[in-house]
Amino acid sequence: QTGNALCRGPVVQQVRNRQWLFPMATKNWRPQRFDHEGAALRFARISKRVPIWKLAFASNIPKAYIQMVERGEAGLMPSQRKELEVLLGVPLRRRNKPRIDRTP
């Protein structure tokens, strides 16, 4: 019985990255059309029907902090952004510069 006492709680549950995805939720996804990355995060989360508590639990980021990011009151660290991008399956920020900015 002492062996079972050590294996209780949500820590034991396995969290899979793309468990809650819906296949066509991110068709034609463009993160640059949103005002800030929090708006893109909120749209991706709602369109994929992922509750905020599940995203917070899976990413190990506090729920209140994710809510602040979605409102535009805080920003994400690069490691946090990468984790959320993996969990949601979409980029939250444009990676490449537009072609006109790259030409000499």
Image (cartoon, helix red, strand yellow):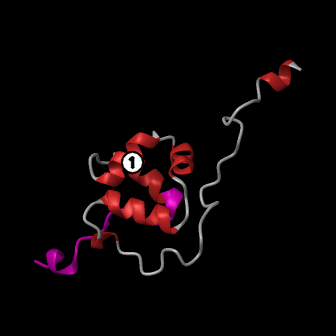
Main SS type for the magenta part?
loop
Q: Is residue 99 left or right of residue 14?
A: left
Question: Camera-side residue: 64 or 101?
Answer: 64
Q: Where is residue 27 drawn, in percent x and y? A: 47, 80
Question: Camera-side residue: 104 or 99?
Answer: 99
Instruction: Please report the residue visible at 34 percent of the width from the left and 50 percent of the height from the top.
Output: 69
101 part of magenta stretch: yes
- Label 1 environment density (alpha carbons within 10 Å; few <14, some 14–19, many ≥20): some
Q: Where is residue 48 drawn, in percent x and y? A: 53, 66
Q: Which residue is mark 1?
A: 67
Instruction: Please report the residue visible at 31 percent of the width from the left and 53 percent of the height from the top.
Output: 71
Highlighted range, magenta: 86-104
Where residue 30 sits, quadrant-wise, is bottom left
Q: Is residue 65 visible?
A: yes
Q: Is residue 1 left or right of residue 64?
A: right
Q: Residue furthest left?
A: 104
Instruction: Please report the residue visible at 41 percent of the width from the left and 66 percent of the height from the top.
Output: 43
Where residue 90 sits, quadrant-wise, is bottom left
For the image, the number of numbered tags is 1
Q: Where is residue 65 drawn, in percent x and y? A: 38, 42
